[in-house]
Image (spheres, rainbow, N blue to C red):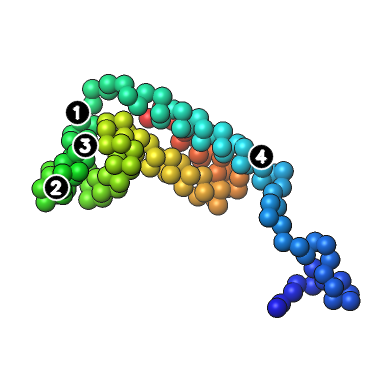
């Protein structure tokens, strides 16, 4: 087994710092987790607050009907007209079924992917600009009115 010199004393014995730590969080790491959690909490609230409210969006009704048809065994592009792209319905369908197969389930499936996108934006922003960059990128996207 290879041991680093920082974890051995002159006699070769392990120092107390050599023990594995299960929870090695720093204060900065905990603050980052709290701020990102709060931001995602706000994003979740913004996405689920009106799931059951009538929106009057024609496209939304078509998408739900397409998902209902997929539940009957029909496939997008072969049996169902689908203009959203080749993967949208196939990506939405498992979550649509998991969430109950209703209009609210279709909306929640879209919201789930939206939240995953926010986490992705945070991760990329963090790589490019550190923790402040990740938080700023994610916050701008969460607070954007569109």
* Viewport quadrant of the N terminus: bottom right
Contact between marks 2 and 4 (CB within 8 A): the answer is no
Residue under the image location 46 percent in, 28 percent down: 45
Q: Position of residue 115 (x, y in %)?
A: 43, 40
**Res. 58 mark:** 1
Q: Position of residue 141 (x, y in %)?
A: 46, 36
Q: Position of residue 116 (x, y in %)?
A: 43, 44
Q: CA distance from mark 2 to mark 4?
A: 48 Å
Q: Is residue 142 above or below residue 26?
A: above
Q: CA distance from mark 2 to mark 3?
A: 14 Å
Task: Say which label, 2 or 3, has the lower sequence index.
Answer: 3
Q: Is residue 82 visible?
A: no
Mark 3, Cα crowd under 10 Å, few <14 / some 14-19 / many 20+, is some
Task: Say which label, 4 or 3, has the lower sequence index.
Answer: 4
Task: Say which label, 2 or 1, has the lower sequence index.
Answer: 1
Mark 4, Cα crowd under 10 Å, few <14 / some 14-19 / many 20+, is few
Task: Say which label, 3 or 1, has the lower sequence index.
Answer: 1
Residue extending farthest to the bottom is 1
């Amino acid at each position: 087994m290879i041991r680093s010199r920082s974890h051995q004393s002159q006699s070769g014995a392990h120092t107390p710092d050599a023990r594995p730590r299960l929870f090695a969080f720093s204060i900065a790491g905990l603050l980052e987790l709290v701020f990102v959690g709060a931001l995602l909490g706000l994003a979740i609230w913004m996405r689920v607050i009106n799931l059951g409210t009538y929106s009057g969006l024609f496209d939304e009704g078509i998408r739900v009907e397409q998902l209902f048809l997929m539940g009957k065994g029909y496939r997008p592009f072969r049996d169902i007209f689908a203009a959203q792209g080749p993967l949208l319905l196939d990506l939405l369908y498992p979550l649509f079924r998991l969430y109950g197969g209703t209009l609210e389930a279709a909306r929640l499936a879209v919201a789930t992917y939206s939240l995953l996108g926010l986490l992705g934006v945070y991760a990329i922003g963090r790589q490019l600009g550190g923790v402040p960059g990740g938080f700023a990128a994610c916050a701008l996207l969460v607070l954007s009115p569109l």
